[in-house]
Image: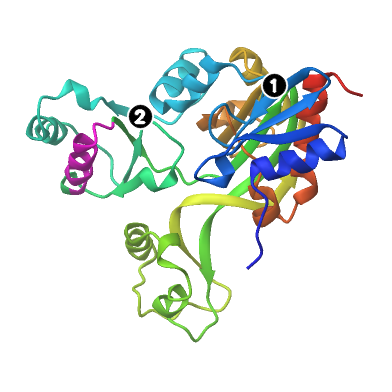
Amino acid sequence: MKKYLSNTGLYKVAAKNLGLKVEQVHKKQRPKWEVLMISHGRKFFLVSGAKPGLFPEARKWNGYFSDSKMLSQKVLSKIGYNTIPSKDILVSDYSSERVLTKHLASKKYTYPSLIKRDKGQNANNIAIVENIKQLQQVARKHYLTKSSFMIQPILDQDEYRVLVVNKKVVLMHSKENRFVVGDGTSTISQLLDAIPNIKKDSVFEQWQHSRQGTKPTTVLSKGKHFDFHLTKIPSTTFYRTKNIPAEVRKWALQLADDMSTAVVGIDVFIPDLHDSKSYTIIEINNNPGVHYLEKDCNDLESSIKIYEMVIKNFFKLK
């Protein structure tokens, strides 16, 4: 199996390409969290997949802002950006599981709904619920871990990642659900058997069956897709590192300026590329790595170039 470079691995290549000194100054249990020191003369910066982060120009408060989905959605909505309608649940407001689940039962929600944990970027913390019983089950788990959460409708629109670095939109690509493709003879269950369990989402699969009127023993028609995971992954259906659509570029740069941030990764629904009023922000990330480009988009070169640009900007190199 091919081993792909981590973000710090990419930084090592980028720094060496520019003739700069790069060394590991702090070893971590996970190699991707190692801390590197990149220096030019007496000037230096530290970089890591965890703290202190991947971008030396990023501000600490921007990281705090983007780490909370509730906070970022609330503020972005307040300053005029479209965000997904959400019901925020602060578990600290409830004295017990029973009080929380009773409160949820007293409200009306549109099903199916998404449940997202407020903090963190881990897609495994997202769940689909189709009724109040399932919502209460998920809520109990969040209560036990003291994790506040959001209840959101499921929007089925074209999703993109847009990356702004140092006042430039350097990347835009589509994101799509993971899927298997029918061969006309295999059942959906047989096709899914080839997918590692860690990459599948059984609740989402059940939801897909209910949407499509299929079941695990259904033979999937040749060429037909069956999505098996809620979280969308990077794709090259739309992929640009140059010639970003003008309306997207203008909108993304304005968002970064409004946030007073040098770096922001934006996950956004865009039903109409030419109309920024149609854009809906899913979430933002102040420490957006680009290591996935090699594996998911077959583009190692662009990930290295982005980090070279970051280094050149910091040290004011030509």
Dot 2 alpha-carbon crowd within 10 angstroms: few under 14, some 14 to 19, many 20 or more: some
**Is residue 139 on the magenta stretch?**
yes
Q: Is residue 2 above or below residue 13?
A: below
Left or right: 183 in relation to 135: right
Left or right: 179 in relation to 276: left
Q: Residue at x 50, y 19 (%)?
A: 76
Q: Is residue 15 above or below residue 204?
A: above
Query: How many labels, in total?
Result: 2
Task: Tell me where residue 5 appears, x and y as whole percent.
Answer: 68, 51
In 3D space, how far apart are the residues under numbered discs 1 and 2 (Cα atoms)?
25 Å
Task: Tell me where residue 88 appears, x and y as whole percent.
Answer: 30, 26
Dot 1 alpha-carbon crowd within 10 angstroms: few under 14, some 14 to 19, many 20 or more: many
Q: Which residue is mark 2?
A: 86
Q: Which residue is mark 1?
A: 253
- Which residue type carries mark 2? Ser
Residue 305 in view here: no
